[in-house]
Image: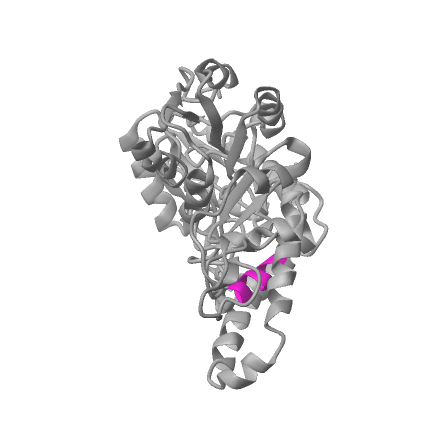
Amino acid sequence: MTATPKFDPASVRASEFPMTRIWSYLNHASVGPLPQRTIRALDEFNQAMAVPQVWEAGDRGAQLCAVRGAVARLAGSAAERVAIVSSAGHGISICAAGIDWRNGDEVVIPHSEYPSLAIPFLAQGDLGVRVRWAAKTDDGRTSMDAIESAITARTRAIAISHVEFADGYLNDLAELGQLCRDRGLLLIVDATQSLGAVPINVDRWGIHAVVAHGYKWLHAGFGIGVAVFSSEGMERIRPTHGGSASVCGNPFVAEPIVTWHPTAERFEAGAQPFALIAGLQASLTLIEGIGPEWILLHARGLIDRLVGGVVDKGYRVSSSLESKHRSQFVALTSGTSDGDLRAHVALTEAGVVTAIRSHGIRVAPTFYNTSDDIDRLIEALPELGVSHTA
């Protein structure tokens, strides 16, 4: 059963996502569509820049402060520990480069992680940093036991996705945070597939840094993301690049002194992408008004409806349905890559938007999707003729 809405889905679909009149969009794990309020905010900013002196005379900091505050509330942190970044790879690179590595130090990362999480740590190889890959289980899941087994005396950090991109596997960050506290390790998290749609708490769970790009569940488009730090993370991750925005004092003096900003602004080197910040703020007003707790509950309810229908048609859900590891999206499979591709094409032709990933057809609903979207998907799936249990 789907969750009881705390808002009117029909009204939101009509006012914010008019494409739903044609498409059943279930691909938010790839790209979250821009709400109409966000498009208006972007347009308004660009129009304002036609007379830049008027825009400059206004309160440029208010919007940025509002964004930092909203992100902090979503992430369980504080506004002064939120940095604006250009992408997930940028934010993870800030963390990976900012650790005080010694030759021979190690970071543990689950196998088959998303490139924007893994590559910034691999790039530290010139410093003698080694990545130790934690093996997946036989069914392709991340194992806490494998992560713990990969830790050695030289391990300095663990880097992991909150929700894994291929099949929506939800990693237990509270458990992992306790492990890191016990071992004195840094915990760096890619929350691109969760922030805004799944509850997360940096301070309570012992996470040192969370990074997310804006173009998925934050519905803010490309070129903007956020990095959120704990107090300890701010102390243990140092800035490695700088500019006028990252230092205290007057940066225009002939010989400026580098005194890093006491807040996460130290990680922001230059002028902010103010247009994208305006868009992000608009999207955050929508997301905060609904809340990640409800978004996750609603999406899980839609997935429950999906599971019964696709199994009856002979498909298997390849994602974990264990409560502690269920997120807001799943993957389903016919059992073969060719069968998955045929089903994906059939869905697209029927106006149902999904994605193909390594675990099969990825279905990723969110707050404005309804049971009608799920029923449309089930109806459009080609019949396999043989039922499989999940």
Q: Position of residue 16 (x, y in %)?
A: 57, 63
Residue 108, picture quadrant: top left
- Residue 28 within the magenta-colored segment of the rendering: no
The residue drawn where x is 64% and y is 68% is 62
* Residue 348 vertical position relative to residue 60 in the rendered view, above or below: above
Return the residue nearer the eye: 244 or 46: 244
Left or right: where does residue 360 sit relative to residue 245?
Answer: left
Residue 340 visible in rendering: no
Left or right: where does residue 83 sit relative to residue 286?
Answer: left
Name the dominant secondary structure of the magenta segment: helix
Total count of labels: 0
The residue drawn where x is 46% and y is 53% is 215
Q: Position of residue 97 (x, y in %)?
A: 41, 41
What's the magenta region? Answer: 277-284
Return the residue nearer the eye: 312 or 230: 230
Residue 50 visible in rendering: yes
* Residue 42 vertical position relative to residue 192 in the rendered view, above or below: below
Q: Quadrant of the N terminus?
A: top right
Residue most toward the front?
Answer: 255
Q: Position of residue 223 (x, y in %)?
A: 42, 58
Left or right: where does residue 385 sit relative to residue 226?
Answer: left
Coloration mode: one colour
The residue drawn where x is 67% and y is 52% is 290
Return the residue nearer the eye: 307 or 231: 231
Left or right: where does residue 339 sit relative to residue 52?
Answer: left
* Residue 251 vertical position relative to residue 91 in the rendered view, above or below: below
Return the residue nearer the eye: 155 or 297: 155
Q: Position of residue 198 (x, y in %)?
A: 60, 40
Residue 388, picture quadrant: top left
